[in-house]
């Protein structure tokens, strides 16, 4: 082997294929598996058909959804309003409902207030919550600005309710509902105030009557429902008041105060909280600065402030200081 030398003139080796054998194998496979090949082609055609149908159905769904969305957008003028505001320099645009569906229940043992199906007030505790429940809403957003309970079965509660109602800004939506009994100490001045707010039954409310009302301060009454007690030992039947209240454009619901740091704080507070009278007055707002003389103690109700230590004690629970 060590002496072997390749022949450079030799022709390269090319293996010969058995053509007859290849043709024979092809014919045999065609005869033995004709059904398999036919099934494969049918399956491929079925897959193509399914793909075409899927694409068609998706196109129909997309077109139908687009038409429905276009129809809803066309109805925004009557069902929704567009609210724009800037937050951290970014323009935020959101769709808001153009109206609210408000439902108020007044009964012996339960009082509820719902807005667009969401419960914002519910009091069904036995022996609790007697009197007139008051809820105040922002007329532009529908948000709850204040919620109070006045036990007008007891002395002086009607005066507290009158004070609170007088401190509410014009335009706010006010909801009233009685639970159990709310007229025993409801005197003429409070009844007259309710009548000025639009109530047709305020003067005639009597022992254990049921009553609910939705009104806009300085505006129209959206609804009032009343049920009279038929005997001294019984209550009026439960009343359910359902009303539709249109919302006001936000630019018509805010005061146009000068752009100062104090008024920016005022605007932020007055857009969320209600019942503080001149603090939120559009015409003559009270100052937010409090600078008492040194060493002078100021007492209001059971609260006091000392200028030296800047300590404030609040008699009772109020949500506003926490917000």
Image (cartoon, rainbow, N blue to C red):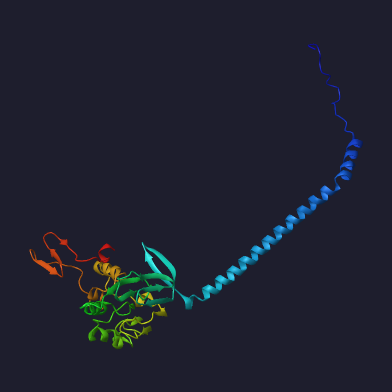
Above or below, 16 against 311 in this view is above
Residue reaching furthest to the front: 233
Which residue does the image show at 89% across and 45% down from the upper left? 31
13 relative position to 274: left or right: right
Figure check: 204 above or below 10: below
All told, the count of numbered labels is 0
Front residue (pair 174, 69):
174
To which quarter of the image does residue 60 belong? Answer: bottom right
Q: Quadrant of residue 148?
A: bottom left
Q: Residue furthest right?
A: 20
Among all residues in the image, which is located at the extreme left?
295
Is residue 88 or residue 76 the one in the foreground? 76
Quarter of the figure with the C terminus: bottom left
The answer to whether any part of residue 222 appears in the image is: no
Q: Position of residue 217 (x, y in %)?
A: 31, 81
Where residue 184 appears, as percent x and y from the top left, is: 25, 82
Identity of the residue furthest to the top in this view: 3
What residue appears at the point 57 percent right and 71 percent down from the top-left corner?
A: 68
Residue 322: image quadrant is bottom left
Q: Is residue 95 left or right of residue 12?
A: left
Give the residue displayed 58% in from the left and 69% down from the top: 66
Q: Residue at x 26, y 87 (%)?
A: 192
Q: Whole-percent x and y of residue 108?
A: 34, 77
Up-down: is 42 above or below 245? above
**Does residue 21 appear in this view?**
yes
Please provide percent x and percent y for residue 296: 8, 66
The quarter of the picture where the N terminus appears is top right
């Amino acid at each position: 082997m060590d002496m072997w030398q390749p022949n450079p003139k030799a022709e390269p080796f090319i293996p010969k294929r058995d053509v007859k054998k290849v043709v024979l194998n092809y014919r045999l496979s065609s005869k033995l598996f004709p059904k398999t090949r036919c099934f494969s082609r049918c399956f491929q055609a079925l897959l193509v058909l399914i793909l075409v149908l899927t694409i068609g159905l998706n196109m129909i769904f997309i077109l139908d959804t687009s038409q429905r969305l276009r129809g809803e957008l066309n109805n925004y003028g009557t069902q929704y309003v567009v609210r724009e505001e800037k937050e951290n320099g970014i323009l935020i645009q959101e769709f808001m409902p153009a109206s609210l569906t408000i439902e108020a229940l007044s009964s012996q043992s339960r009082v509820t207030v719902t807005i667009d199906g969401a419960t914002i007030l519910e009091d069904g505790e036995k022996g609790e919550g007697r009197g007139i429940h008051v809820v105040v809403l922002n007329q532009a957003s529908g948000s709850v600005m204040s919620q109070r309970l006045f036990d007008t079965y007891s002395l002086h509660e009607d005066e507290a309710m009158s004070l609170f109602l007088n401190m509410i800004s014009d335009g706010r939506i006010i909801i009233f509902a009685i639970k159990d009994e709310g007229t025993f100490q409801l005197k003429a001045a409070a009844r007259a105030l309710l009548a000025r707010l639009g109530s047709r039954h305020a003067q005639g409310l009597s022992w254990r009557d049921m009553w609910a009302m939705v009104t806009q301060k300085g505006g129209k009454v959206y609804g009032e429902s009343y049920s009279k007690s038929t005997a001294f030992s019984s209550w009026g039947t439960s009343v359910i008041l359902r009303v539709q209240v249109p919302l006001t454009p936000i630019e018509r619901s805010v005061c146009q105060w000068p752009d100062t740091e104090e008024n920016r704080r005022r605007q932020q507070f007055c857009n969320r909280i209600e019942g503080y009278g001149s603090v939120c007055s559009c015409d003559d707002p009270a100052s937010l600065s409090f600078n008492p003389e040194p060493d002078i103690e100021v007492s209001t109700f059971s609260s006091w402030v000392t200028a030296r230590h800047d300590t404030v004690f609040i008699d009772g629970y109020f949500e506003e200081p926490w917000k």
